[in-house]
Image (cartoon, rainbow, N blue to C red):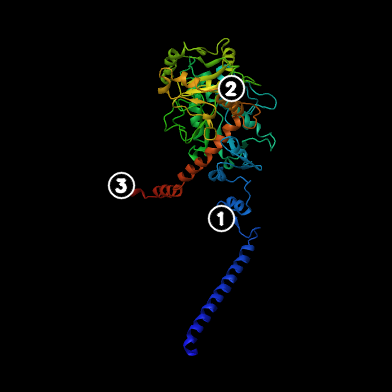
């Protein structure tokens, strides 16, 4: 019997021996790698500098959820979590749209061309001293013309913000900073006051054959396309301001790869401007901000307010149709008005005493009326099917605006029934939200945290990753193209005879 059990005993011993040998070998293997990792000098033994997205790995290892992660200006944590932490507190980006850029603590790096004054401040009648290109804004800031000119003045505010970044404190909280080396920049800023050029100089003055506005656009195209920065990126990383719908009419098609800052896309073909590559910026409201607004639902007797041009072309034809539908309704103010005379004061009083304010498409999908309504805390009623809105990727307009399709608005009593169905509680919630977000639409100098200037820079920053992707992809075959050109230039002359 003993002889018969011997093979089983030997087999059992062999298996245990092999298992023991495997365990010991595995232990020594892991132990040896422990010393290899430790020799790299990383506090957690792994050299993340050798890995892609090293910031992501280091934060996961440290279990530090309060650190914001960026890769080419994209917040990685927000891709996985609808809310995240900034400075130790949980933040919802939908409720705090300015937080996406603030949390990185790294402002957008902007290179601004030192373009001749005729493109910018000379349009404000500023006279350059000597070789100076820019005014000394520490001493005196050139004035911008008032009235309707102000609504498209973003070029003025953004340029001032960049000029002041050279003497602002490092902890100013600014979303953009000027750099003097274009190779360090995220974007290239073109300081051409195109809206002002259109407003002031679009008419031909005899004996000239061409308007100053058109002449400046031709100069602009020649200037930009000759710059090394433009050639390097094909213009894709250039930021060009064309906020007035009629500005840059001649140059826009030639500068289409650039990132435009616009009020809407109403007069642009999609191949030239679109929501993927360009930024929609707010108008500067022309009526006064309603400071210390304590008015409530009962304190605003007018239910629905509209005052402006009624007879418009293109998409604005709807205005006259709505006028005939609404003009006789109770508690509704729908009349013609302009900024002439006492128009701005009357519009201010009217909006501040109304619960809802109509924002109807005009010659283009957008109008300054929306931003006047926001400043008045008058809940906007938007009837414009093609409208694009500023910062809508981080700001939910449906929380403080009512949207109505054009086809519905033209139905008998549709608008009236919808507006009257909104009770005090819902209106008050939207009214409070308007007071909370109004700062995002205020243009100031010097700029303040989360004001319109900073929000526009943040919107530009969110476009940068896509811009870099396009530039990098466009450079894939650059070496091959150069080599092919060299080969073509060395072909013997007699080969061309065949």
* Distance from the alpha carbon under mark 3 to that under mark 2: 77 Å
The crowd level at tag 2 (other Cα within 10 Å; few <14, some 14-19, many 20+) is: many
Q: Residues within 10 Å of mark 1 (few under 14, many from 20)?
A: few
Q: Residues within 10 Å of mark 3 (few under 14, many from 20)?
A: few
Query: Counting residues from the N terminus, which is met first, the one under dot 3 or under dot 2?
Result: 2
Q: Does residue 150 appear anywhere in the picture?
A: yes
How far from the left and from the top, in percent, is residue 460? 55, 35
Task: State the image coordinates of residue 442 (x, y, percent, origin top left).
Answer: 61, 26
Q: CA distance from mark 2 to mark 1?
A: 50 Å
Q: Which residue is mark 3?
A: 497
Nearer to me, 248 or 59: 59
Which badge, 1 or 3, comes first in the chain's sequence?
A: 1
* Residue in view at x 45 percent, y 44 percent: 474
Image x and y of residue 307, in percent: 52, 14
- Identity of the residue drawn at 49% across and 38% down: 236
- Helix, strand or loop at disc 2? loop
Dividing the picture into quadrants, the one containing residue 20 is bottom right
Judge by depth and name the residue closer to the eye, 207 or 40: 40
Q: Which residue carries the number 2 mark?
A: 377
Residue that mark 1 sits on: 51
Please indicate whether residue 331 sits to the left or right of residue 37 in the image: left
Label 1, secondary structure: give it.
loop
Which residue is most to the left? Answer: 498
* Mark in the foreground, 3 or 2: 2
Q: Work out how far the residue at label 1 is from the one at label 3, CA to CA, in angstroms.
A: 55 Å
């Amino acid at each position: 019997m003993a002889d018969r059990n011997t093979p089983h005993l030997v087999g059992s011993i062999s298996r245990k021996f092999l298992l023991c040998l495997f365990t010991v070998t595995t232990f020594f293997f892991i132990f040896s790698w422990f010393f290899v990792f430790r020799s790299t000098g990383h506090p957690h033994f792994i050299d993340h500098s050798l890995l892609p997205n090293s910031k992501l790995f280091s934060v996961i290892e440290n279990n530090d959820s309060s650190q914001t992660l960026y890769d080419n200006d994209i917040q990685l944590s927000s891709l996985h979590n609808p809310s995240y932490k900034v400075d130790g507190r949980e933040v919802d980006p939908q409720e705090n749209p300015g937080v996406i850029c603030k949390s990185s603590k790294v402002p957008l790096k902007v290179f601004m061309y030192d373009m001749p004054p005729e493109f910018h401040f000379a349009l404000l009648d500023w006279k350059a001293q000597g070789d100076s290109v820019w005014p000394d804004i520490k001493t005196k800031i050139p004035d911008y013309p008032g009235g309707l000119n102000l609504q498209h003045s973003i070029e003025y505010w953004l340029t001032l913000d960049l000029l002041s970044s050279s003497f602002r404190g490092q902890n100013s909280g600014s979303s953009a900073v000027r750099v003097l080396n274009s190779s360090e920049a995220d974007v290239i800023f073109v300081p051409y006051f195109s809206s002002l050029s259109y407003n002031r100089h679009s008419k031909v003055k005899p004996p000239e054959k061409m308007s100053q506005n058109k002449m400046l656009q031709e100069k602009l195209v020649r200037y930009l396309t000759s710059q090394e920065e433009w050639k390097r990126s094909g213009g894709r990383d250039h930021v060009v301001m064309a906020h007035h719908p009629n500005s840059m009419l001649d140059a826009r098609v030639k500068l289409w790869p650039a990132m435009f800052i616009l009020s809407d896309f109403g007069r642009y073909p999609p191949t030239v401007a679109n929501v993927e590559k360009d930024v929609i910026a707010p108008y500067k409201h022309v009526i006064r901000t309603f400071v210390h607004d304590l008015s409530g639902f009962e304190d605003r007797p007018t239910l629905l307010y509209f005052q402006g041009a009624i007879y418009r072309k293109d998409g604005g034809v709807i205005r006259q149709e709505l006028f005939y539908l609404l003009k006789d309704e109770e508690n509704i103010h729908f009349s013609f008005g302009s900024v002439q005379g006492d128009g701005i004061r009357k519009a201010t009083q009217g909006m501040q005493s109304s619960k809802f304010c109509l924002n109807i498409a005009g010659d283009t999908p957008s109008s300054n009326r929306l931003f006047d309504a926001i400043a008045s805390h008058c809940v906007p009623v938007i009837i414009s099917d093609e409208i694009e809105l500023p910062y809508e990727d981080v700001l939910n307009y449906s929380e403080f605006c009512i949207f109505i399709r054009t086809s519905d608005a033209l139905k008998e009593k549709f608008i009236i029934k919808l507006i009257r169905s909104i009770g005090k509680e819902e209106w008050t919630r939207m009214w409070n939200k308007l007071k909370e977000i109004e700062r995002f639409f205020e243009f100031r100098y010097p700029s303040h945290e989360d004001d319109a200037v900073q929000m526009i820079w943040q919107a530009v920053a969110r476009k940068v990753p896509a811009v870099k992707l396009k530039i990098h992809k466009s450079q894939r075959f650059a070496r091959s193209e150069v080599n092919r050109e060299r080969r073509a230039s060395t072909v013997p002359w007699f080969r061309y005879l065949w």
